Image (tube, rainbow, N blue to C red):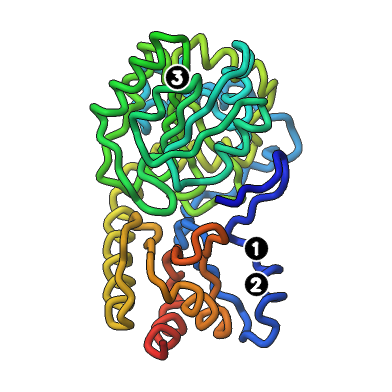
């Protein structure tokens, strides 16, 4: 597998400038299906007048931790560290393990590429494997559950057994539950007090607010203290505190949105089936395609102003997100002309 240089850039979804350069004659506006972000953002109330003018208030940050602990099933607020997106937390976690004297990180792959990159930046030797048992060989083990982009689910009992192995040798299992809000998988966030386990939760994907940059690490309080010391003060912005404070407490919106996304994912499945494109996996925020025609499908949609996520190292793979409310007709027409 071809890998970027340590510290080098990794291609991700959401790059409309690159899409325009690749398909200069495509119609505007672009429809971005290259990410797994909810196209229906949370309807937050207007920001307080001082949300941008003042430093974030510590009591609001503590309230956010309480809400996150309840929403994600953490044992308590002391087990939660909020940060400016889970992306920022990856090198911190890798650095904690590298500080024990280096060693190996093992990542259950194929998956989100930034985990392996963060481990390499921390000086760890990285193995990317499809064998869950192989993860126990390293000092740092990483599982994205449900997986991005395949939607693969690892059972809770297997994750807890792996966490126990890592804990016994002072290692660490990181379970990235970025898409757990829209999955039938079982979270392990309630099991972090035993140690050897960190759970990551992303706010922006399910709530449709990736630009807010907010994520959470859930772990034993000793590990949380180390993470927070590296994040420093004011790790979460005033606007993020306001929006997430409303969204995490809004159980009615969460339930209704899960049902809506499930229905829209089924609608997309039907369109793909009509076009003769089999769905190999995914979650209700994205569908995963493995097809020899993946590159042709990518170009067909790109020429029509619809960008999807392809993978240079896996040319038969494609990820397709959900269209926004007004985008379905264009997507339907494009798929029906494949």
Residue at point 37%, 62% (across, down):
287
Closer to the camera, 313 or 279? 313
Tell me where residue 113 appears, x and y as whole percent.
55, 45
Q: CA distance from mark 1 to mark 3?
A: 33 Å
Mark 2 burial class by Cα count in 10 Å: few <14, some 14-19, many 20+: many
Q: Is residue 15 above or below residue 64?
A: below
Q: Which residue is the extreme one toward the front?
A: 1
Question: For the residue carrying disc 3, how many other residues have a C-alpha within 10 Å: few (<14), some (14-19), or many (20+)?
Answer: many
x and y, in percent, of residue 36 in the image: 47, 56
Q: Residue furthest bottom?
A: 337
Circle 1 crowding by C-alpha within 10 Å: few under 14, some 14–19, many from 20: some
The mark found on residue 15 in the picture is 1
Q: Is residue 53 above or below residue 33?
A: above
Q: Is residue 95 above or below residue 131?
A: above
Nearer to the camera, 249 or 325 = 325
Instruction: Report the residue marked by disc 3.
Output: 219
For the residues labelled 1 and 2, say whether their Cβ atoms are less than 8 Å apart: yes
Q: Quadrant of residue 73?
A: top left
Where does the C terminus fall, quadrant-wise?
A: bottom left
Residue contact between numbered discs 2 and 3, judged by CB atoms under 8 Å: no
Q: Earlier in the sequence, mark 2 or mark 3?
A: 2
Q: Which residue is mark 2?
A: 19
The residue lying furthest to the right in this view is 53
Secondary element under disc 3, as helix, strand or loop, is: strand
Which residue shows up at 61% across the image and 26% down it?
Answer: 124
Give the Cα distance between marks 2 and 3: 38 Å
Which mark, residue 73?
none
């Amino acid at each position: 597998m071809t890998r970027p240089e340590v510290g080098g850039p990794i291609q991700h979804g959401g790059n409309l400038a690159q899409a325009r350069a690749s398909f200069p004659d495509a119609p505007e506006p672009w429809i971005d299906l290259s990410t797994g972000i909810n196209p229906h953002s949370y309807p937050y109330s207007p920001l307080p007048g001082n949300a941008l003018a003042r430093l974030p208030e510590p009591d609001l940050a503590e309230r956010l931790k309480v809400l996150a602990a309840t929403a994600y099933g953490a044992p308590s607020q002391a087990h939660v560290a909020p940060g400016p997106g889970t992306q920022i937390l990856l090198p911190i976690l890798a650095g904690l393990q590298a500080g024990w004297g280096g060693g190996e990180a093992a990542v259950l792959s194929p998956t989100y590429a930034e985990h392996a990159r963060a481990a390499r930046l921390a000086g760890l030797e990285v193995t990317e494997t499809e064998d869950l048992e192989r993860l126990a060989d390293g000092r740092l083990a990483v599982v994205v559950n449900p997986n991005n982009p395949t939607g693969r689910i690892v059972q809770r009992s297997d994750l807890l057994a792996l966490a126990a192995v890592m804990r016994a040798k002072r290692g660490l299992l990181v379970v990235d539950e970025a898409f757990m809000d829209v999955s039938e998988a079982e979270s392990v966030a309630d099991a972090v007090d035993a140690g050897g386990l960190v759970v990551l939760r992303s706010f922006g994907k399910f709530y449709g607010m990736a630009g807010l940059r907010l994520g959470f690490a859930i772990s034993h309080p000793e590990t949380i203290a180390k993470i927070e010391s590296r994040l420093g003060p004011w790790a979460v912005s005033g606007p993020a505190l306001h929006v997430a404070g409303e969204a995490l407490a809004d159980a009615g919106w969460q339930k209704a949105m899960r049902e809506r996304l499930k229905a829209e994912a089924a609608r997309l499945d039907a369109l793909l089936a009509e076009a003769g494109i089999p769905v190999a996996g995914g979650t209700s925020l994205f569908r995963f395609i493995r097809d020899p025609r993946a590159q042709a499908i990518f170009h067909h949609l790109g020429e029509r102003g619809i960008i999807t996520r392809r993978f240079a190292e896996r040319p038969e793979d494609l990820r397709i997100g959900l269209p926004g409310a007004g985008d379905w007709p264009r997507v339907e027409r494009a798929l029906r002309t494949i």
